[in-house]
Image (cartoon, helix red, strand yellow):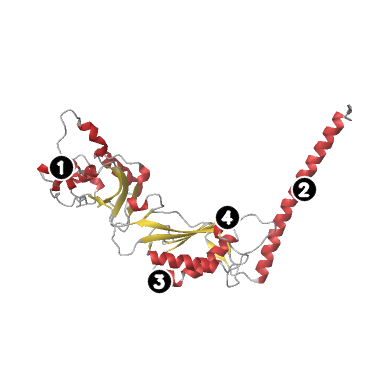
Amino acid sequence: MTPMKRSVQTQVSEPFMESWGEESLPELPAEQSLTEYSDLEEAPSAHTLYVGHLNPQFSVPVLACLLRDTLERLEMPVAREHIEVVRRPRKAYALVQVTVHRDTLASLPWRLQTALEEHLILKELAARGKELLLSEAQGPFSHREIVGKDQLFQGAFLGSETRNMEFKRGSGEYLSLAFKHHVRRYVCAFLNSEGGSLLVGVEDSGLVQGIRCSHRDEDRARLLVDSILQGFKPQIFPDAYTLTFIPVISTSETSVPLKVIRLTVHTPKAQSQPQLYQTDQGEVFLRRDGSIQGPLSASAIQEWCRQRWLVELGKLEEKMKALTMEKEQLQQQLQQHGPVSCTCCVL
């Protein structure tokens, strides 16, 4: 393969057919057509394309629009939702999900270089003094390895924290020090409200960074969560929560995979009477908008119970009112139709 000019790069493997000798190639019979062997051609496969040296002076929507137009010029149409642009003060790059043949991906740098020389691509898309950098995204995960699973791009924006969503950066020794305390507090708070998710590996601003988490760390996290939640009262069953580890696609190569830990507490089932969950240490927490309240004092727990009982009492009063109205309507219908006579015939 001929090396490309300047900084345009890609990572492809040489076709294995080039290593064969001419004598080893089988000859096709004259009466057979080459189209009969079309099924042997490699099918398009999914790839994550890294586009570097984007102009950070543009906003994320503008960069995504320009990048989409650029890829269309390179005969690689991509949907907008498959373009993830990460913009920093002095740099910007994008991760694009594409489904193409391997030879199309291999020819991409050549076609990009040709387009640059012919001035067909907007030069404003690239940062000042640089040229676009194209390559397959480098990192611990390839697209094939995460098919069928959730995935997040490093630098993606997940929005703001809500009543049902809590973010934790989780840097340093988080898994061995702070994780267990957050499991107690937030799971208890979500159980006592409307459910929710704790995401570790996401900054408070909503940007995905990921946390180094090996397979051994995953096993330890699962054992830790199960052991803590088994001590909750009332008892929590396994179907009440879900612990998942979401791969994070990054352009930097790390020895330990980056992931986002997602601990989701499902919406509690309706109970016949109000109840509060307490942790294995006997503490009670409630969820507020973007924060938690607790551990609650005895007076706060009593007030919570009083308010919940008032809510339940209001529901019962509404139900009684509806039943009373239905009874009155039935009585009116009986009065309008008058007495009903019946004749029985005994054989």
**Residues at marks 3 and 2, CA–CA distance in whole angstroms:** 56 Å
Quadrant of the rendered image containing residue 324 = top right
Residue at point 14%, 41% (across, down): 25
Label number found at residue 117? 1
| Mark 4: amino acid | Thr
Left or right, residue 39 beside residue 308 = left
264 vs 231, nearest the viewer:
231
Res. 170 in view = no
| Mark 2: amino acid | Met
Label number found at residue 251? none
* Secondary structure found at label 1: helix
* Secondary structure found at label 3: loop
**Residue at image mark 2:** 320
- Of discs 3 and 1, which sits in the foreground? 3
**Residue at image mark 4:** 267
Q: Position of residue 125 (x, y in %)?
A: 26, 46
